[in-house]
């Protein structure tokens, strides 16, 4: 019996070690960036990189953030908002149509709607770039390097998230609720607005949030579609890490981490994370 | 009285398919032209690029390295993610929600920031090397960034959160009563795990593994940054071909090869999961 208890103890310790290790591994890089951003060492560019843990604390890097980075942050927010809003406008009717129509080959259509998620993002970036070049060369349609060009690439990967999360809710939808409303004399539009929409709303929130975050964090699509005028923040950080390191990116990264925390907290307050998790996961 | 849902489907269908087929067609076609240097592209359709891509060991090695790294990450991430997902799924307290929320938060933060943190941690004068040297375990700093292990670490970080969430949703659907019943009948914890938990979550494990494989095959940021420009996986080679060498046609060809290999794995995964499902129907 004693040996059994010891084995149980050992097993529990091993499990805790693995689970704890995974959490440390997942969180440590983010924490390290936050801590390193408050480094007060010699303000020569790149010093913060060498000084971990920081020897003294200061906010100096926060004052070193170039306007260029704030501009990129603004563009990132605009592009992500575009992807989330337009993605919802395209995705919700698509999900409704897929769930409700009795077309043949619906599974194939659904798979094609989800196809953008199967294509590596870097390939998507290249495909859009080549298409924009073609449009520019043959039709004089200058979309390469424009805001719309960048945003369309992001929209392309955002829509499947909305379709996935709204579709997940529609699968469990009890259509008798709608039938009841209709038979009690509500118009079809009223039924949609008062019955259908409130039920699929968590899916819409989840889809829009996922779209926003995926767009906001993207590098490989923007890599090919951005221009000096319209570049995104992750891309700026990426270039700074590849070529000339600027410790101010630690500071702006910390601001983004704080922003993500606030968004997640708001989601928890307004919708509830469990609702999001249940309707999320676009497969 | 019937609503025309197929009509509602039409506008998003037209829009999405125009973007999908339009861009894919243009880029696949672009791979069949010739690069003339300085970003100019020839007039004639040909298959020279594909011949080069399949004969030049440089490109084949990039693809092989890609597949190798992705397989390593699939195995390692499944080993790490499964216990976490299982523990959270079987937890009966409000801590489970917090643990899940933490995973969601970490997967919401852009991969660039996480790569930045990983580079600081695993850098030659980062905390890991300093600690190991302080303990006298190593004499001089170990290089991790810019090596294959660096890229594996980066890719693991990229996929772990996602994999935990996916496995969690699968394990949650396995009724706890099955495990309790087996234990009441005298099965050891280990036996319950191998004979009940693992078989029932096998479709999830297979799907998760294949999705992770695909994510890693296409992963650009982790490979480029943690590889320090020294680990040349196919996505990194593609980026260089287009951005540094301005060989747009060759870049398109390589992208098409990457896309084809990912699609092949996707089709395989559909077949595999379907077979697993039907096999399970026979057993139960």
Image (cartoon, rainbow, N blue to C red):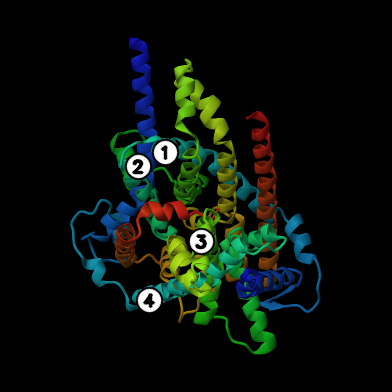
Task: Give me the C-alpha separation between circle 2 and circle 4.
Answer: 35 Å
Of residues B237 and B96, the one drawn nearer to the viewer in this rendering = B96
Q: Up-down: is A100 above or below B134?
A: below
Sequence-wise first label, 3 or 4: 4
Q: Residue furthest front?
A: A184
Q: Chain of mark 3?
A: A
Q: Residue at point 81% right, 76% down? A: B44
Q: Are marks 3 and 2 on the same chain?
A: no
Residue linked to disc 4: A74
Residue linked to disc 3: A166
Q: Residue at point 48% right, 38% down? A: B171
Q: Chain of mark 1?
A: B
Q: Do the residues under discs 2 and 4 have CB atoms within 8 angstroms?
A: no
Disc 1: CA contacts within 10 A as few (<14), some (14-19) or many (>=20): many
Q: Do the residues under discs 3 and 1 have CB atoms within 8 angstroms?
A: no
Tell me residue B191's x, y (percent).
51, 21
Q: Do the residues under discs 3 and 4 have CB atoms within 8 angstroms?
A: no
Residue linked to disc 1: B89
Q: Secondary structure at mark 1?
A: helix
Q: Residue furthest top?
A: A1
Tell me residue B126's x, y (percent).
34, 48
Tell me residue B28's x, y (percent).
72, 68
Q: Secondary structure at mark 3?
A: helix
Q: Residue at point 23% right, 59% down? A: A39
Q: Are marks 3 and 4 on the same chain?
A: yes
Q: Residue at point 71% right, 53% down? A: B57
Q: Up-down: is B21 above or below B66?
A: below
Disc 2: CA contacts within 10 A as few (<14), some (14-19) or many (>=20): some
Q: Chain of mark 2?
A: B
Disc 3: CA contacts within 10 A as few (<14), some (14-19) or many (>=20): many
């Amino acid at each position: 019996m004693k040996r059994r208890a010891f084995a149980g103890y050992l097993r529990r310790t091993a499990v805790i070690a693995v689970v704890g290790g995974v959490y440390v591994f997942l969180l440590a890089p983010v924490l390290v960036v936050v801590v390193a951003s408050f480094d007060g060492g010699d303000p020569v560019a790149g010093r913060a990189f060498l000084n971990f843990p920081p020897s003294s604390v200061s906010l100096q890097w926060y004052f070193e953030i170039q306007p260029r980075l704030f501009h990129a942050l603004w563009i990132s927010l605009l592009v992500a908002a575009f992807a989330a809003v337009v993605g919802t406008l395209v995705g919700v009717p698509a999900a409704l149509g897929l769930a409700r129509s009795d077309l043949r080959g619906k599974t194939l259509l659904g798979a094609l709607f989800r196809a953008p998620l199967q294509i590596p993002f870097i390939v998507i970036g290249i495909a859009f770039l080549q298409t924009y070049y073609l449009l520019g060369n043959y039709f004089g349609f200058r979309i390469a390097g424009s805001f719309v060009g960048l945003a369309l690439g992001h929209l392309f990967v955002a829509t499947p998230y909305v379709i996935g999360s709204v579709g997940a809710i529609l699968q469990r939808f009890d259509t008798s609720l709608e039938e009841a409303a209709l038979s009690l004399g509500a118009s079809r539009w009223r039924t949609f607005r008062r019955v259908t929409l409130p039920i699929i709303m968590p899916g819409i929130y989840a889809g829009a949030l996922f779209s926003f975050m995926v767009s906001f964090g993207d590098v490989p699509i923007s890599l090919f579609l951005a221009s000096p005028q319209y570049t995104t923040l992750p891309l700026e950080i990426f270039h700074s890490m590849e070529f000339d390191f600027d410790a101010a990116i630690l500071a702006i990264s910390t601001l983004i981490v704080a922003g993500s925390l606030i968004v997640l907290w708001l989601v928890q307050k307004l919708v509830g994370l469990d609702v999001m998790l249940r309707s999320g996961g676009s497969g | 009285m019937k609503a025309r849902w197929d009509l509602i489907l039409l506008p998003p269908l037209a829009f999405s398919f125009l973007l999908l087929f339009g861009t894919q067609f243009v880029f696949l076609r672009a791979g069949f032209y010739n690069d003339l240097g300085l970003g100019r592209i020839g007039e004639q359709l040909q298959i020279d690029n594909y011949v080069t891509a399949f004969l030049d060991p440089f490109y084949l090695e990039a693809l092989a390295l890609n597949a190798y790294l992705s397989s390593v990450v699939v195995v390692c991430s499944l080993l790490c993610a499964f216990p976490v997902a299982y523990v959270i799924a079987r937890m009966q307290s409000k801590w489970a929600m917090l643990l899940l929320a933490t995973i969601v938060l970490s997967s919401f933060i852009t991969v660039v920031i996480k790569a930045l943190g990983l580079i600081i941690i695993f850098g030659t004068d980062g905390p890991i090397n300093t600690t190991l040297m302080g303990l006298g375990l190593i004499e001089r700093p170990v290089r991790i960034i810019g090596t294959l292990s660096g890229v594996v670490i980066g890719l693991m970080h990229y996929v772990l959160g996602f994999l935990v969430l996916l496995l969690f949703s699968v394990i949650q659907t396995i009724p706890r009563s099955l495990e309790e019943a087996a234990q009441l009948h005298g099965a050891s914890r280990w036996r319950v795990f191998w004979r009940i938990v693992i078989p029932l979550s096998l479709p999830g494990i297979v799907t998760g593994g294949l999705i992770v494989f695909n994510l890693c095959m296409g992963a650009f940021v982790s490979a480029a940054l943690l590889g320090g420009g020294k680990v040349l996986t196919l996505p990194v080679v593609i980026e260089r071909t287009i951005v540094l060498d301005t060989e747009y046609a060759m870049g398109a060809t390589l992208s098409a090869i990457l896309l084809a290999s990912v699609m092949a794995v996707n089709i395989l995964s559909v077949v595999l999961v379907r077979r697993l499902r039907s096999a399970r129907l026979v057993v139960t």
